[in-house]
Amino acid sequence: MKPQIGISDENLAAVAHALNSLLADEFVLYTKTRNAHWNVEGPDFHSQHLFFESQYGALEEVIDSVAERIRSLGHYAPATLKSFLQLTHLSEQLHEKNDAQGFMRELLTDHESVIILCREYVDSFANEYKDSGTSDFVTGLMEEHEKMAWMLRAHLK
């Protein structure tokens, strides 16, 4: 059954499509964070290994919540690597070294990109698509990314 929640079918589809791209970004960022966890090297290996683990754990929860939000709007969430790579705004390619600082710079850039995208979605979801619920949801995601970005930034000082 289609949701009857006071939002037009067209607006629900537009919001779900935007969330599909956000889900793809989240999955690519999760994968890159897992890569950092698995492959970080250097004298600070153990502490960085644990740090990246905490970050990918948080992203895993974000991924699930975004997919469930898409479903709650009556649409299907993309769930293949191919679809994620087609929908993402991020690059899966690493441009930095295999050390904590390199991974952190790369991940920080991606988090900041997601923050900017979320900030755009907050306004458009509420104003253009009349979906305050998803706007509020994306505000929470933005705050989660701001916290993760802050932690990465603090390591880079």
Image (tube, rainbow, N blue to C red):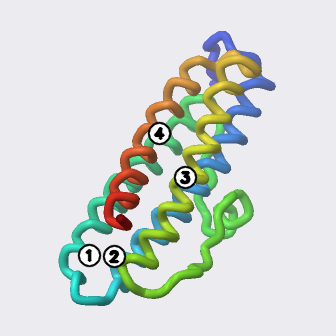
Where residue 87 appears, as percent x and y from the top left, is: 71, 57
Outermost residue on the top side: it is: 6
Q: Secondary structure at mark 1?
A: helix
**50 horizontally vs 112: left or right:** left
Q: Are marks 3 and 1 in contact (CB under 8 Å)?
A: no
Residue drawn at the location 74% of the way across and 63% of the way down: 86
Alpha carbons under labels 4 and 2: distance apart: 22 Å
* Camera-side residue of 38 and 153: 153
Outermost residue on the right side: it is: 10
Q: Residue 115, relative to residue 134: is it above or below?
A: below
Q: Secondary structure at mark 4?
A: helix
Q: Are marks 1 and 2 in contact (CB under 8 Å)?
A: yes
Q: Amino acid at mark 4?
A: Leu
Q: Amino acid at mark 3?
A: Glu
Alpha carbons under labels 3 and 2: distance apart: 20 Å
Question: Which label was assigned to residue 156?
Answer: none
**33 horizontally vs 123: left or right:** left
Q: Answer few, some or many: residues within 10 Å of disc 2's Cα (few below 14, many 20 plus, some between 14 and 19).
A: many
**146 horizontally vs 79: left or right:** left
Of labels 3 and 2, earlier in sequence is: 2
Residue drawn at the location 61% of the way across and 64% of the way down: 80
Q: Amino acid at mark 2?
A: His
* Camera-side residue of 96 and 27: 96
Alpha carbons under labels 1 and 4: distance apart: 24 Å
Of labels 1 and 2, earlier in sequence is: 2
Residue picked out by circle 4: 141
Q: Are marks 1 and 4 in contact (CB under 8 Å)?
A: no
Alpha carbons under labels 1 and 2: distance apart: 5 Å
Alpha carbons under labels 3 and 4: distance apart: 12 Å
Residue drawn at the location 19% of the way across and 74% of the way down: 47
